[in-house]
Image: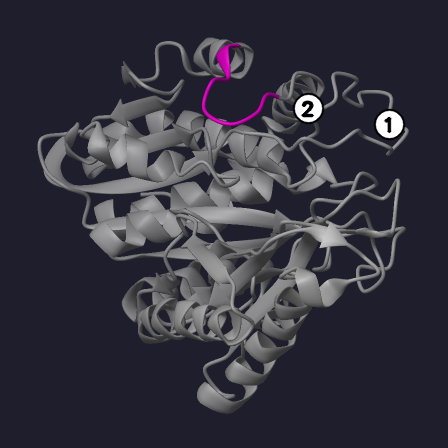
Amino acid sequence: MLDSKALLAEAAGHAQTLVGIRRELHQIPEFALDLPKTQARILESIEGLGEITLGKDLTSIALVIRGGKPGPTVLLRADMDALKVEEETGLEYASTNGFMHACGHDLHMAGAIGAAHLLATHKDELNGDVLIWFQPGEEGHHGADVMIEEGMLELTGSRPVAAYGLHVFTSLPLGAIACKPGPLMASAGDLHVSFHGSGGHGSMPWLSKDPVTPMVEAITALQNLINKSFDQFDPVILNVGWIRAGDDATTNVIADSASFGATVRTFSEVNTKKLHELAPKLSHSIAEGFGLSAEVEFGRATKVLMNDAASVERVEKVAKSLVGEAGYVPMQNPIAGGEDFASIVTEVPGAFVFVGACPPEIDYQTAPTNHSAKATFDDSVLPLCSALLASLAMEHLG
């Protein structure tokens, strides 16, 4: 069985091909669950490597690489979808269709393709099978849940004993690998609140039921609720992203309704449940105090991404063998971004890993972050991504 360093050297031999695939994918970004061009390019890249199953309600791909000997299954996952962002990087291979791989999913796909080739080359040495998911709909469309519902965890005949995924970041130095056990990423969801009163003339507010004032009260009160009702060491984040009321063409009309939308982040299921109980009570009580009614709705959220401690130990071992002691970053705190890989590790123990992809000529501490229209990722990191994923699979199947 090859060690991680040997796999990295082998992956480096595929670097030019992987960079080419990544840049092709970068030019054809697609959104949500229906990614036909992306799916076709991946299928071309993995032809002949194993058994392929396509999704029904989404354009997912599941690749099974059978090992030479019987054993357990390990799942590797790469997300496929892009963002609704007009690219402003100025790269010669920049996208021009109004979407952008601003979160690096093009690198995730190329890295997983490289891992697939490494594992297929050495499949006779594997004591078990590798299941590789190419998953649409990570960016808020719950693609992982759809793949689970379609039975994609059972394709080898047995559920995986471990699952691994990685994510590139511009906010880490090129080639650094970061991870931690326990909560790694937040549950991410939405809160929508509407206040309904009765409109009228702005000069006579006592004859109307103005919804704007209680809406503003609720926005402030929710922040106080979080500050006073939740443990600061198990934080809750609620940030209002939009407010709607009235018409900006005039100022002397009291609107019938007012509403706001907020992103909500929690790091434990206990706090998620608690906020779902307290926020509606608070909003309704404020509305009733002004003689209005309120509607409160939480959108579907990702789960808290909980890394399995034993899986993180394997990540640390492999990472240090690939990039050395100094290249591995043991994270102290989770990040507030959401990721539907959380649904996978709810079903299967595993770990999600961060890999630095900031171009060396840019300061990673001030670089445009993931999701920025100006975010750029150094694709020289692709062999490392491929070797990392392949090595983690081999840790279980060697």
Q: Which residue is mark 2?
A: 26
- The quadrant of the picture occupied by the N terminus is top left
Number of other residues with Cα within 10 Å of mark 1, as a class: few under 14, some 14 to 19, many 20 or more: few
Position of residue 379 measured from the top left corner of the image (x, y, whole percent): 70, 36
Q: Are marks 2 and 1 in contact (CB under 8 Å)?
A: yes
* Image side of residue 39 versus residue 314, left or right: right
Main secondary structure found in the magenta portion: loop
Position of residue 216 measured from the top left corner of the image (x, y, whole percent): 68, 69
* Image side of residue 231 versus residue 250, left or right: left
In the rendered image of this protein, does residue 60 appear above or below residue 393?
A: above
* Image side of residue 210 versus residue 164, left or right: right
Start and end of the magenta stretch?
A: 30-36
Question: Relative to the observer, which residue lies in front, 177 or 109?
Answer: 109
Number of other residues with Cα within 10 Å of mark 2, as a class: few under 14, some 14 to 19, many 20 or more: many
Position of residue 44 measured from the top left corner of the image (x, y, whole percent): 48, 9
Q: Which residue is mark 1?
A: 91
Q: Quadrant of residue 121?
A: top left
